[in-house]
Image: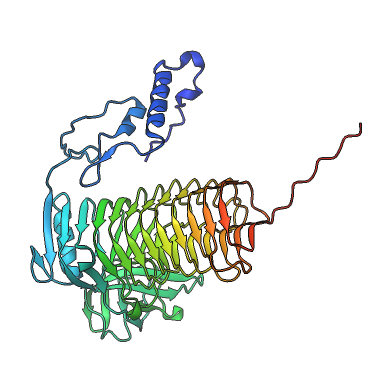
Amino acid sequence: MSRPLSSHTRPSHCLPNERRPQSIASRRRFLGMVSATLGGGMIGGLTANGRVWGDEAARGLGMPTPSDPRATDGDDRFEPKWDERLTISVGVDRGDLVGRDDKVLQAAVDYVAGRGGGTVKVLPGTYTLRNAVFLRSGIRLVGSGLDSVITKIPSERIALSDDSDWYDREITLADSAGFRVGDGIVLQATDPDRGGQTVIKRTLVARSGNRFRLDDGLRSNLWLTGKPTCASLFPLLTSERTADVTIENLTLDGNLANNENFNGNYGGCVFLQDCNRYTFRGVTARNYNGDGISFQICHDVVVENCHCHDNADLGIHPGSGSQRPRIVGNRMDRNDQGLFWCWGVKYGLAEGNRMEGNRSYGTSIGHCDTDNWIRDNDILASGKIGILFRDDPRGKDFWANRNRVENNRVLDSGGEAGIGIDITGKTRDVVLAGNTIRESRGTMNRIGIRIGSQVGGVKLDQNRIEGFATKIVDLRPAPSEPESTPS
């Protein structure tokens, strides 16, 4: 986090010209050259464990940067690029650790993380979880593609039989036959005071009969008046406040047919909260009764060459406040929505993805999702709309402004009144350039691009629109003609 200016300090650009240091001009020239050379791309490199090495950002402050760093105790910004790091293997019948559930995977993750980071190899086999695997900073979790399958038990939901206050660390179930110590659970209820929904994720860590101790306090009231329940619902992989993690070549299967729906703000095949610099590469996230890959307030997340399919809700869900997500080369098939830009997702890139057969939208973007690029994607056979710019009238300016949509191929969107690209609300400063929007099933009442009546500036540039009853519907009022001036 950048350090705020004190009340006694003014930035250099506020100084009178004659008092500005001479280095400012040269520094600006340098930064301009860097920007031009890199074309606005990311600078700096990553080590095997994801940490910055030779960080160019320091140069913008006029500071020297190490060209050949040493490992220094307490310095996690600069790290040598090691040729080899600790590796431990997990298998169902062979490996450094042997087992087929969350306990063996968690033991491997904790072992490697506790020794400064490294790789956990998940050997071929099926691993059935009773709790999420909690990821830790500096690890790499790598499997054998479709042969390394992580799935979960069927879910069960039981009512609580006694009140628990917000300061308690225990619950009592009406029937505990299906629950064990170590299980991941979600506690849900109606808030007895405000009427909203209470959702608490915890682990059962001790028991006496139907009475269970939790791994952490409740911090919300679970009173019987709110009809509280306990369900064995959890993400397969999860983490909070960790960084520099890579997940590769794993298959995550949510056992959808035997599990209740779990909201993507709490679960998914993957669910991350407040994490930085995660990379998912070659991961299959499928059959979750919820989202495939979901991350909330997570920055610099890369999802690359993954396959998210047949999930009940969202394929890939860059969640609220996430900055600079990079969603590249993925397939998102037969989810409710393929790629869902949540709230306040900024400076992101979705490129070279294929989104096919998603039941509602191929991709949708909305509340304060600004300054993103959606380019060179195939968005095919969406159930309602190919690309949706969502409306959100609840605030001063909650729309998906300043986004660029270019060189995408949007084919066969919606039913008889389907729409290729739909821009709603007061969305403004959007560019649609070089897209091919095509309908191959007959014109019916289908529309290529629809622009809502309150939408602001939209630039349409060399889009190819074919096979629709109407290529472009622009509902905005026509600009008024200027009054003529008498001669």
Image quadrant holding the C terminus, namely top right
Q: Is residue 111 visible in this depiction of the protein? A: yes
Judging depth in this view, the residue of 437 and 285 nearest the camera is: 437
Residue at the extreme top:
18
- Residue 48 is left or right of residue 362, and the answer is left
Q: Is residue 399 visible in this depiction of the protein? A: no
Residue at the extreme right:
487
Q: Position of residue 353 (x, y in %)?
A: 40, 56
Judging depth in this view, the residue of 219 and 136 nearest the camera is: 136
Q: Position of residue 389 (x, y in %)?
A: 55, 57
Image quadrant holding the N terminus, namely top left
Q: How is the image coloured?
A: rainbow
Image: 292 above or below 464: below
- Residue 203 is left or right of residue 194, and the answer is left
Judging depth in this view, the residue of 15 and 195 nearest the camera is: 15
Image: 482 above or below 159: above
Q: Position of residue 75 (x, y in %)?
A: 21, 38
